[in-house]
Amino acid sequence: MNPFPLPRATPEDIGLSTAGLARLGRVMQGEVERGLVPGAVALIARRGQLGYFESFGQRDPASGAPMAKDSIFRIYSMTKPIVSVAAMMLWEEGRFLLSDPIAKYLPELGNVRVAVEQGADLGRVDAERPITIQDLLRHTSGLTYEFRGNGPVHKMYTAARIYSRDQTNADQVERLGKLPLLHQPGTKWEYSRSTDVVGRLVEVLSGMSLGQFLQQQLFVPLGMTDTAFHVPVPLQARLAEGFAKDPETGAGVQLLNVKTAPKFESGGGGLVSTAADYARFLQMLLNRGRLDGERFLSRKTIELMTADHLGAITGAPDLLLPGYGFGLGFAVRLQPGIAHVPGSVGQYFWGGLAGTTFWVDPAEQLFAILMIQAPGQRDYFRTLFRDLVYAAFDD
C-alpha cells in the first residue's frame, strides 16, 4: 500500500502554517496523555496535496501497541457518503429517478404506515405520500434509528432486531416494511436506517451484494485497499480499538466486531477504513468526481449531492447543527456564521459513531480526516479538530 494517498507538500506551500499544525499535534498528544482517547490518526490535504498526516497514542490500549498511520478504524456512519455515491453512480446510468417511490424497487416498503399516538395506545395511519429515494438519501423517509430515542417506534425497532448483523440486507428491508414510520415521509429530518435501505437498493439495481459493488466500482479503482465490511485475519493486527471503559463515565465501550464477515452489509454504518483510503475518496469528491484521470461522478452530480435538500424541513438539532442543511449523504454548511465551528459556505461533512470524522471545504480546496475509536468523546473531538485545522491556516 502506498503510505501517502496524495502528493506531499510543505504546509506553507498549500497555505497552512507549520507552527499551527505543530500546535494541533501538541493538543492531540495532550488529549492522549490525559487519557481521553487511546490514539488517533489525523490527515489534512489542501489544493490536491497532503499537508499533514500523523498518528498519536495507541492503536490498542489493551496491548499497548502504538497507533500507525495505516491503522484500520470502524468508520460507522462515514459509510453513508460512500454508499450514497454508489447509488448516485447508478442514478447516472438512468437506473432510477430521485423522485421515484422506493417501493418501485423494494416493494416491501410499499405499504408502510405511520405511527400516531391514540390516547395511551399507538395507532397507525396511512402514509400521505410514498417514501422516495431522495427521502432516503436526505433522511426524510420517516424511518429512524433504534438508539435515537425511547419511544414506542424505537422499541419496536429494537424488538425486531433491526440492528442484527446476522441478517441479509434484504431481511432488514422486509422487517422495516412491517414497522411503522416515526414521521410522515418528507416532513422531518430524522437520522435513520435510510442509508441501509439505499444499500439494499444498490444490490437490487446492480445484481451484486453491496460489498461487491463498492469493491468493483469504488474501492479498487480509487485504491482504497483496506476499506471493506470486515477486517480479514492478515490485517487484524492493524485494527484500532477503544478503551474498555469510557474514561469520563466509566461505562463499558462496545464497538462492532469486524473480525468476521457479517451477513448484514450495513450501508449506513458497516465499513472499516483507513485515513489514507478515505482521503482518496474525499479527493475524488473535492475534484468534482474525478481522480487520477478516472471519472466516477459528474461535476453536476457532486453539486447536487452537496447542495441543501431540506429547505424548511427541520429535525434532530443535536445532529443537524444550526447553520447547516443536508444534501444527499452529507450535512451541508449554509451560512458562514451561526454554527459554533469554523468553515465556509458549501462545506460538507459527516462522522461516525466511534468518533471518526471528515469534512470537505471546496472554497478552501481542503479536506480533513480524524480517525479515533472513542464513542463518548466524538462530539468533543469533532469540534476540537475542526477548530485546530482552521486555526492552522496561513493564507
Image (spheres, rainbow, N blue to C red):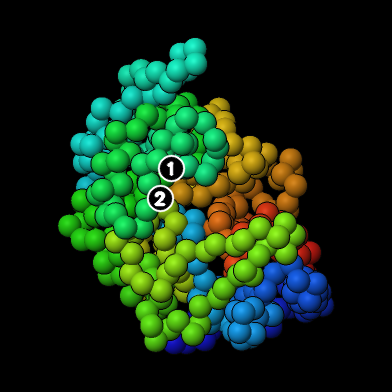
User: Which kind of residue does numbered mark 2 sit on?
Assistant: Tyr
Residue at (79, 76) in percent of width and height: 33
Residue 327 lies, in percent from the top left, at 49, 44
Q: Which residue of the protein is positioned furthest toward the top in this rendering?
A: 119
Examine the rendering and report whether any part of residue 121 can be seen. Answer: yes
User: As displayed, is residue 188 above or below residue 86?
Assistant: above
Residue contact at pointers 2 and 1, CB within 8 angstroms: yes
Tell me the residue at 51%/50% (across/down): 330
- Dot 1, how many residues are within 10 Å of its Cα: few (below 14), some (14-19), or many (20+)? some
Residue 43 is situated, as x and y percent measured from the top left of the image, at 62, 73
Name which residue type carries label 1: Thr
Local crowd at mark 2 within 10 Å, few (<14), some, or many (≥20)? some
User: What x and y, as percent, mark residue 180?
Assistant: 37, 29
Locate residue 178: give its quadrant.
top left
Residue under the image location 26 percent in, 66 percent down? 212
Query: Looking at the rendering, in which quadrant would you find the N terminus?
Result: bottom left
Counting labels gives: 2
Q: Is residue 195 left or right of residue 119?
A: left
Q: Position of residue 83 (x, y in %)?
A: 38, 56
Q: Is residue 274 left or right of residue 322?
A: left
The residue singled out by tag 2 in the image is 163
Q: Which residue is mark 1?
A: 158
